[in-house]
Image (spheres, grey):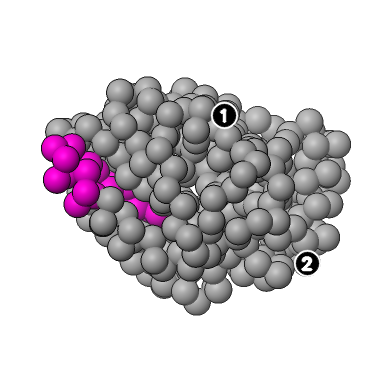
Amino acid sequence: MKTLPRVKLAMLPTALEEAPRLCKELDITLFVKRDDNTGLALGGNKARKLEYLVGEAVELGADTLITTGAPQSNHCRMTAAAAAKVGLACHLVLNGTALTVKQGNLLLDELLGAKVHFLGSDDASLAPARMQGLNDELTARGARPYLVPLGGSSPVGAVAYVMAIEELLTQSCGQNFDYIVHASGSAGTQAGLLAGVKSFGLPTRVIGISVSRPQLRLAREVLELCRDTLTHAGAQTRVEEDDVIVYDEYVGRGYGLPTEASTSALELFARREGIILDPVYTAKAAAGLIDLVRRGTIPAHSRVLFWHTGGMPALFADLAPHWGEKA
Ligand SMILES: Cc1ncc(COP(=O)(O)O)c(C=O)c1O
């Protein structure tokens, strides 16, 4: 695998923790990969991706990061934190209109010194043009911006999850997992995990639980991004359509809107293991995990890894206003 530009942002390796009381409840062997504790400004999966994205930005001589997401985007909060840590300016284009009450991730964005620009619309498809406009304005004023894609989901960002599989291999001492289950939003985490599993020749199936996108769309995006990530990493491995597993039936009424199953999953993880999930991503992924086990799609006694991708600041925010399609 190629050596790629990288800056240190995350506290790695994250813990690999057994969940014995949930194992009993679900009749599987369950471990949790604690990427909620990546350390950067309350943690989460984006710290890994940003190590490579900011690595590239710094190598290109950038002095400003620009990215986008929903008002409660974890990705935006962590991009703001990465910029602060490395000494770059940060501009965030958030869906919706300005909120007067600052809570959760939005409160942290400002605390971290990011300049927040509201899109003035819930239509996230307008964000790329706004980011480009901002890029042009800042460039005209002498800045050197770097555009971080939505969710950090490009081959540059997703490669971090190939490396996360290498980290997992070191921790799990040759004991493979049958399944990895995680929340899948903008495809980068799943594409990277799948690229990692294939590159290291593991038998593990990576199951993405969609938090927003329909199955067909997300599966196609994961496959394309996985292939591009393998190319970017200089790996020769092939990945096929059958390798991509996405379930979209746990989204419920939409992105960020809790379901009965996600609320019970949130409570179950908290009350059995003292593990706090988030309402937007990981609670829906956990709802998927529980249902797939109960349906027998994940057979009893399987070795399962639940990849906890973070997101807890959203627990401390009113999730009702201004939902875009994706954080
Ligand atoms: C907490 C959390 N989990 C999972 C995801 C999904 O990751 P990806 O966008 O790489 O699919 C995100 C993305 O924003 C997130 O914030």
Cα–Cα gap, marks 2 and 1: 34 Å
Kindly indicate the quadrant of the structure image that contains residue 141: top left
Q: Could you tell whether 8 is left or right of 17 in the image?
A: left
Q: Could you tell whether 94 is left or right of 24 in the image?
A: left
> What residue sits right under mark 2 in the picture?
295
Q: Residues within 10 Å of mark 1 (few under 14, many from 20)?
A: some
Q: Is residue 261 visible?
A: yes
Q: Residue at x 29, y 29 (%)?
A: 88
Residue 303 higher or lower than 287, as above or below: above
Please name the amino acid that badge 1 sits on.
Answer: Leu
Residue 320 appears at what percent x and percent y? 70, 56
Residue 144 magenta-highlighted: yes
Residue 152 magenta-highlighted: yes
Residue 279 vs residue 239, the one in the foreground: 279
Kindly indicate the quadrant of the structure image that contains residue 256: bottom right
Residue 271 higher or lower than 304, as above or below: above
Question: Of discs 2 and 1, which sits in the foreground?
Answer: 1
Count of marks overlaid on the render = 2
Range of residues picked out in magenta: 135-157
Residue 230 appears at what percent x and percent y? 28, 54
> What residue sits right under mark 1 in the picture?
42
Q: Residues within 10 Å of mark 2 (few under 14, many from 20)?
A: few
Residue 258 vs residue 125, the one in the foreground: 125
